[in-house]
Amino acid sequence: MKTILKLILLLLFSYCTSLSAIKIEIIAKVNNQVITNIDLENRLNLALAISNLPGDEEIRKQLKRQILDVLIDENLKIQESGRLGILVSSDEVYAEIKRLERNLNLQTNSL
C-alpha cells in the first residue's frame, strides 16, 4: 500500500512540475484582450496540421508572424462584432466547422 501511495505522489509531483515548466507570456495586446505564447503555439500547430506542412523549426519561424497577425485580426473582428451587437449562434459555429471539415477532407469532429 505504501508503494502505491509513493508512486501516486511521485506521479502527482512530476505532473505538477511539468505544468510549472510552461511559461505563459503575453505576446500581443488587442485593446483589452491578450494573446499569449500558448495561443500562438496552439494556432500554429493547427495550421501545420491542416496544411500538412512539416513542423520543423524553420517553417514554424516563418509562419509565426503570419499566425500572430491572424490572431490579432480575429480579436479585432470579435471585439467589433461585440460592439455592434452581432452574435453568432452555436448552431452556426458548428455548421461552419462541419463545412470546413468537409472542404479540408478531415474526419468529422476533428476540429
Image (cartoon, rainbow, N blue to C red):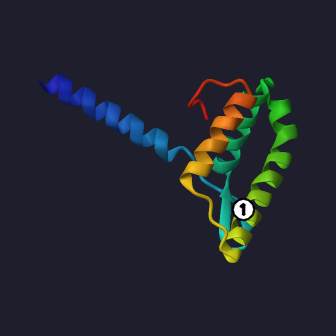
Q: Using the rendered view, name the quadrant where residue 17 is placed.
A: top left
User: What residue do we see at 84% from left, 40% from top?
Assistant: 63
Task: Describe the element under mark 1 as helix, strand or loop.
Answer: helix
Image quarter in which the N terminus is found: top left
Could you tell me residue 53's position as x and y percent?
A: 81, 25
Question: Which residue is drawn at the image coordinates 76% and 66% (left, top)?
Answer: 76
**Residue 34 placement: quadrant:** bottom right
Relative horizontal placement of residue 26, taking residue 110 as reference (left or right): right
Local packing at callout 1 (Cα closer than 10 Å; few below 14, some 14-19, many 20+) is: some
In the shown orientation, is residue 27 left or right of residue 12?
right
As rendered, which of 101 and 40 lies closer to the eye? Answer: 101
Q: How many marks?
A: 1
- 14 versus 72 height, above or below: above
Residue 61 at what x, y percent from top left? 83, 38
Tell me the kind of residue under disc 1.
Asn
Answer with the quarter of the image where residue 47 lies. Answer: top right
Q: Nearer the viewer, residue 29 or 105?
A: 105
Asked whether the viewer can see residue 45, the reply is no
- Residue with the mark numbered 1: 75
- The image shows residue 81 at horizontal and vertical percentages of 71, 69
Q: Residue at x 53, y 43 (%)?
A: 21
